[in-house]
Image (tube, rainbow, N blue to C red):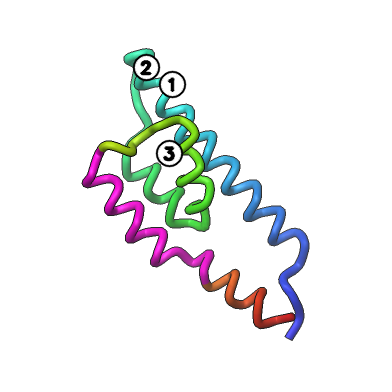
Amino acid sequence: MPGMPAWAWWLLLLWNAATTALYGFDKLMAKMGRRRVREATLLWATFLCGCVGAWCGMSLFRHKTQKGSFRWRAIVLTLLNPLWLVLWWAWHAR
């Protein structure tokens, strides 16, 4: 079974960086009192292989850390995240 191709790792890195930036953008909009990114969009970005970026964004920008309802949904989506399947596949392909 072959390992995961390099482009797939780059795609995961890019997606997680974009997810972190999305959380930062939402925090900036909140500070400026402007229109925000929908929570559903943040959660979809978290679920679609962006869980590492989401948690980095929450920590780095101190964003959505106090909102319990968002936090528990982020935890559940992280646990259900397809990234775990990708990592398992990459680990077993060695």
3 vs 1, front mark:
3
Where's residue 80, x and y in %?
A: 39, 66
Where's residue 85, x and y in %?
A: 53, 73
**Front position in the image: 35 or 71:** 71
Q: Left of 14 or right of it: where is 60?
A: left
Cα–Cα gap, marks 2 and 3: 15 Å
| Quadrant in the picture for residue 3 | bottom right
How many residues crowd around disc 2 within 10 Å: few (fewer than 14), some, or many (20 or more)?
few
Q: Earlier in the sequence, mark 2 or mark 3?
A: 2
Circle 3 SS class: helix
Cα–Cα gap, marks 1 and 2: 5 Å
Circle 1 SS class: helix
Q: Earlier in the sequence, mark 3 or mark 1?
A: 1
How many residues crowd around disc 3 within 10 Å: few (fewer than 14), some, or many (20 or more)?
some
Q: What residue span does the magenta drawing correspond to? A: 67-84
Where's residue 42, x and y in %?
A: 39, 43
Cα–Cα gap, marks 3 and 1: 13 Å
Q: Say which residue label 1 marks.
A: 28
Residue drawn at (63%, 55%) of the image: 12
Q: Which kind of residue does numbered mark 3 sit on?
A: Met
Task: Identify the image quadrant of the C terminus.
Answer: bottom right
Can you say whether 92 is above or below 83 in the image? Answer: below
Q: Which kind of residue does numbered mark 2 sit on?
A: Lys
Circle 2 SS class: helix
| Quadrant in the picture for residue 91 | bottom right
Q: Say which residue label 2 marks.
A: 31
**Front position in the image: 87 or 12:** 87
How many residues crowd around disc 1 within 10 Å: few (fewer than 14), some, or many (20 or more)?
some
Q: Left of 8 or right of it: where is 58?
A: left
Where's residue 43, x and y in %?
A: 37, 48
CB under 8 Å between callouts 1 and 2? yes
Q: Say which residue label 3 marks.
A: 58
